[in-house]
Image (cartoon, rainbow, N blue to C red):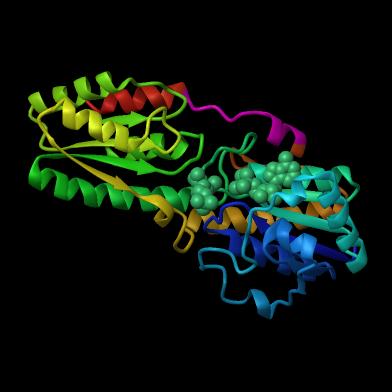
Amino acid sequence: MKRIGVMTSGGDAPGMNAAIRAVVRAGLASNVEVYGIRQAYAGLLAGDFELLTSREVSGILQRGGTILQTARNDEFKTAQGQKKALRRLNERGIEGIVVIGGDGSLRGALALENLGIPVVGVPASIDNDIYGTDMSIGVDTALNTILEAIDRLRDTATSHNRCFLIEVMGRNCGYLALMGAILGGAEMVIIPEHQVPMEQVARDLEHAYTRGKTHAIAVIAEGAPYKITELEDYLKQHPVGFEIRLTILGHTQRGGGPSAFDRLLATRMGVTAVEWLIAGTHGVMVARQGREQVPVSLTDATTNMRTISEEYMQMAHMLSR
Ligand code: ADP
Ligand code: F6P
């Protein structure tokens, strides 16, 4: 293999740049040219490729976002779009691709693999919703951002005897909310995988108030069964003792430089992806399981659901008393 491509796709995640750098430099170390594909599948369809030298990936290890940019693209989901993409790759003599992205991006990667282009996926999404890997790139940094926000909000909540409802990202997955709640010492957590009726949220918050807590924090996943504003309205109509305030952390969770953990995860995964492509291992995602990196087939990674640990759920509940 003499020429490969690399792209970042789906929502950006801190550590994507560290992964790009690792892919490029691991490729060059094996005399493989690496082309950056800009704006994910949209750039692939447009033939927006750029040869990346070692200098182009200099000074990006610590930067958030992605120098290759990312995009969401519907044309690539069609058979016609995928054929066009294959044509673009053949025109440039690109023999393999590293796709760095979330579960949707990995479904796209599988489509390319099925067309005959060797692909290795690298899981990168703050949501940590990808099956088969303990951690995806960006999760640790996003979680640290969430914790910093919760810590700050608790300071002001305590000063005013208030309850903060805090919405965190995660699409349909409650991982960030659950871990944010446990590690941020929240009183409540509401995630898509675990239904908590609004009446119960009100009862638990009222209980926290009557037991003498000076604040309450409720972490709500964006994919929760009801919107944070609906919960706010409900709690205003059914007072629990605390004044209610609402904060949506939004895209602040996606920005910022990657943590040490994410830099290491991205660097290892980027190097491994290139080694596997060159060795002829493809159609797989680089997965972290324990301390090891193992191949998980793209089919398994994209057809199975990652579940939430019941043990963590119980821990969140027990420690919030
Ligand atoms: P993420 O990768 O973060 O989960 P998306 O789900 O938005 O983000 O997917 C990113 C892109 O991957 C989509 O815009 C689309 O171009 C491509 N993609 C998603 N699902 C498929 C699919 N089933 N087949 C082909 N491409 C897909
Ligand atoms: O998948 C990452 C993610 O940040 C999700 O947590 C969130 O639901 C989504 O992307 C937001 O997407 P956009 O940036 O298109 O608003």
Per the image, is 300 magenta?
yes
Q: In the rendered image, which quarter contains the N terminus?
A: bottom right
Q: Quick one: 128 or 30, which is closer to the camera?
A: 128
Q: How many marks?
A: 0
Q: Residue at x 15, y 44 (%)?
A: 157
Q: State the image coordinates of residue 141 (x, y, percent, origin top left).
A: 45, 53
Question: Is residue 213 something that shows in the picture?
Answer: yes
Q: Is residue 53 above or below residue 14?
A: below
Q: Is residue 73 left or right of residue 189?
A: right
Quadrant assignment, res 244:
top left
Q: Residue at x 36, y 29 (%)?
A: 190
Q: Is residue 42 left or right of residue 137?
A: right
Q: State the image coordinates of residue 304 (x, y, percent, origin top left).
A: 66, 28
Q: Is residue 299 left or right of residue 127?
A: right
Extreme residue in the bottom direction: 55
Q: State the image coordinates of residue 199 (x, y, percent, origin top left).
A: 25, 19
Q: Is residue 36 above or below residue 40?
A: below
Q: Residue at x 68, y 53 (%)?
A: 73
Residues shaded magenta: 299-309
Q: Quick one: 87 or 219, which is closer to the camera?
A: 87
Q: State the image coordinates of residue 255 (x, y, percent, origin top left).
A: 45, 60
Per the image, is 267 magenta?
no
Q: Quick one: 156 or 43, which is closer to the camera?
A: 43
Q: In the rendered image, which quarter contains the C terminus?
A: top left
Q: Is residue 91 left or right of residue 69?
A: right
Question: Is residue 281 something that shows in the picture?
Answer: no
Q: Residue at x 73, y 63 (%)?
A: 43
